[in-house]
Structures are given as structure tokens and as C-alpha cells.
Amino acid sequence: MKNSKSNKLVFTAILLVGLFVRLIIAPFSSGSDIVQFAGFAKTIQRHGFCFYNYADAYIEETWPYNWPYIYGPVLAYILGVLAHIVSPSYKAFWVNSYHIVYVSEMWVLALKLVFIVFDVLVALLIYTITRRLLLVVFYYLNPAVIYTSSIYGMFDQIALTLLLAGLFSLERKRTLLAGILLAISLLTKQITLFPILGLAILLSRNRDLFKNTLLGFLIGTLLVLSPILLTCPISLLKLKDTVYMLRPSYVEPLIYSFNGLSSLATLIHRVYNVDTLWFIENWYVFTLILLPLLVSYTLRENDIYLNTLLYYLLFTATYWRVNYQYLTLLTGLLAVGVAREVRKPLIKIYILLALYIGVWFFIFPVDWWFRAHIERPNNTIIETIRAISLNIYVNEYYVFYSLLLTLIEFTILLHVTQAGLKGLKARLYKLLK
């Protein structure tokens, strides 16, 4: 009983420390996505549930940047609600051919508070699932996670919360609820597609489990899409106008690319003027090579958390364009994976990978986001951030970093699937013999 109370006190202390750090820095920095979200919010205010009609209307809607709205409806609903509470105001202008955009600090704080709340919810879920305080620290105090929610400002932790809640519900046989949560996760951000497909393969082994979860998934999808389907269904077709954002290209800037192979191909093109785009365009070849081995693993093992981790790892290891915020999900899944994994070498590599993800924070000139879109920068915080950062701008360092990241990811995938690989080798040997 005493131990339980002690753990709760320590857990509360961890939450408060993480919350204090986040709230101190959140109002004084903004990534470019938060600025663009202000533009999206204005469109949602004007057009309501027909906002997808304007998914690519950045000129007509005078957004700060020419990036389309490519996300699921969940973010749009959040932006729409916030826009009725806090004005999503910003101002954009040109100075010596340089595009400058400043965003309202109230908008920044309001949006980040939502992200921070979901950071806390992920910490609660990790503790509930693992009962290990160190694994909460592993995620919640990881510099990469704090950067995503409270410095740059991105919403990946919302998708992670829903994904983990779905897995937790599934573990307790609440299949309908699990399916609903998984659907909402996918309709928040599409990066959960790989792990949800992997989960579907795992659940296919049990017909009733699969059927009930699928029913929940369909209900969740209908719940999220119903406002649009009832008022402006044709608008969903406009998403085809944003597909160009998914077409493989050179991964600029290299400083913010986390697929090592794509980064290297881009660097070779930049330095030697060699056409390497064909390599990036065929990123899925690596996925297709590893997928049968991972499916073989799925059909042998039965842990929904490890299964989800590995399929998400397949995504981050092979997809042509990986942004830093995508690694927030990976960090949370790794934290749970450490508790579920029984193979000691893999536990060590999981820990290594999560720590390595956090290292980038100390390499990148993070203070940039405290100046880029904030009209009145807080110089005290900027100097503090600079003091703990190497502030490296050299592309080659980041290519090396992402290459090593991808190597660690592939190492985990190959280690996990080696039994399937051995079986494949044996079958090939018989055929050749």
C-alpha cells in the first residue's frame, strides 16, 4: 500500500515537472505549422464543415504558406473550436525577398495547451499499461516529445493517445470501443495507418475479435465523418487535390529529414548533381521486402503493443519522408515496448533508439523557433536554449544522424523477424536444391 502511494506521488511529481517545463516555453516559440494552422482555422471559421473544398486554396484563403490541408477531420474540428475561443491571427509580409510571418502568441499558447494535455494523457496511459515510472520519464521528459508539443507545436501526441487508448481497450476485450478509438486516431493523422494495418493482421487470427473491432472502427469513422457527410459530402473529393504532397521528392531541408536513405540520396544529388530521385521514389521496395517477414512474426506472436510498435517502426524506417514529430509516436510505443519485450538485446536497442531520438534536440538550432514567428522574442529563454544546444547547421551532420537512426530501426526489424528470415532461407534452399 505504501509503495503504491509512493509511486503515485512520484508519478505526480514527474507530471508536474514536465508540465512546468512545457508551460514555461510554450508561449514563446512557434513552428511554421502552427502559423499555417491559424490560416486553416480561419478557413474553417468561414466555411464550416465544407472546409475540405478549400484544402488546397492557399491563395484564395490567404494562408501564410502554400501547404494544403492534408490531415484528417479531427484536427480541423479542434482548430474550429479553438478559433471561436482565441483569434487565429497572424501577419505576413516581405522584407528583402524574405517572407516573414508572425503569429498571435495567444493562438500559439491555446493550441499548444491542447497538445500538452495529450502529452499528459499519453504519460497516464503509459503508466497505466506498464506501471513503471521510468518508462513514463522515457516518454514524457524526452526532449523530442517536449519539442514536438511545446516548442515547434505539432499534434502527433493526439493520434498517439487515441492509438494507445485503443490498444488498452482491446487488451481488456472492449473491442467496440477499441475500434472507435483506432478509427479516430487514423482520422487525426494518417501516420497510424501502418500500425493499424498490422493490428488488423494480428486480429484476423480471431474472427470474433476482428469482426467486433472492425465494427467499432466503422462506427468511429462514421462518427468523425458524419458532420461532413451530412452537410458537405462532396468536399471530401477535394482531398485528391492535395495528393501531390505525398509524391516522393528530394527531402529538403536535410536538417529536418529523418529517413537516412532519402537524406543520403538528396545529399548526393545536391553535391554531385546526380539524379537519385528514382531511389526515393521506390522507397516502398524496402517496405515490401520487410513486410512478409513482419507478417510472419505477427502470425507467431500475440502482443498487440509490440505488434503496433514494429509496424510503426516499419513506417519510420522505410517511408521516404519522415519528420521529427513522427518520432513522438515511436518514442511512446518504444516506452510501452520496453515493458512488454522479453528479449534483453531488443530491450537495450529500444532504449538506445528512444535516447537517440532525443539527441537531435541538442544538435538542431532550436532557438530558431523562438524567433522565427514570434514578434517579441523572449531573449532570456533564447539564451538558455542556445546554452544547451550545439546549434549545428551543416547538412552532412544531419545526414549522418538520420542514417544512424534508420540503421537502428532496420536492426530492430531484422532482429525481430530473424526467425521468419531463417524460415525463408530454408525454403529457398529446398527450392534451389
Image (cartoon, rainbow, N blue to C red):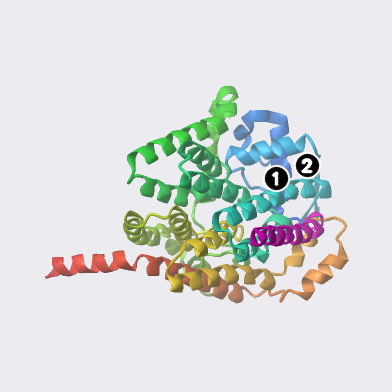
Q: Is residue 383 visible?
A: yes
Question: In percent of the image, x 49 and y 56: which residue is there?
Answer: 248
- From the viewer's side, name the closer residue of 152 and 185: 185
Query: What span is in magenta?
Result: 1-29
Instruction: Please give the residue where the numbered disc 2 appears in the rendered image.
Output: 88
Question: In percent of the image, x 71 and y 52: which residue is there?
Answer: 116
Find out whether the residues at labels 2 and 1 contact each other: C-beta distance under 8 Å.
yes
Q: How many other residues sit within 10 Å of disc 1, few (<14), some (14-19) or many (≥20)?
A: many
At label 2, the amino acid type is Pro
- Disc 2 secondary structure class: loop
Question: In percent of the image, x 52 and y 44: which residue is there?
Answer: 186
* 33 left or right, relative to 227: right
At label 1, the amino acid type is Phe
Q: Is residue 63 visible?
A: no
- From the viewer's side, name the closer residue of 194 and 351: 351
Q: Which mark is residue 37?
A: 1
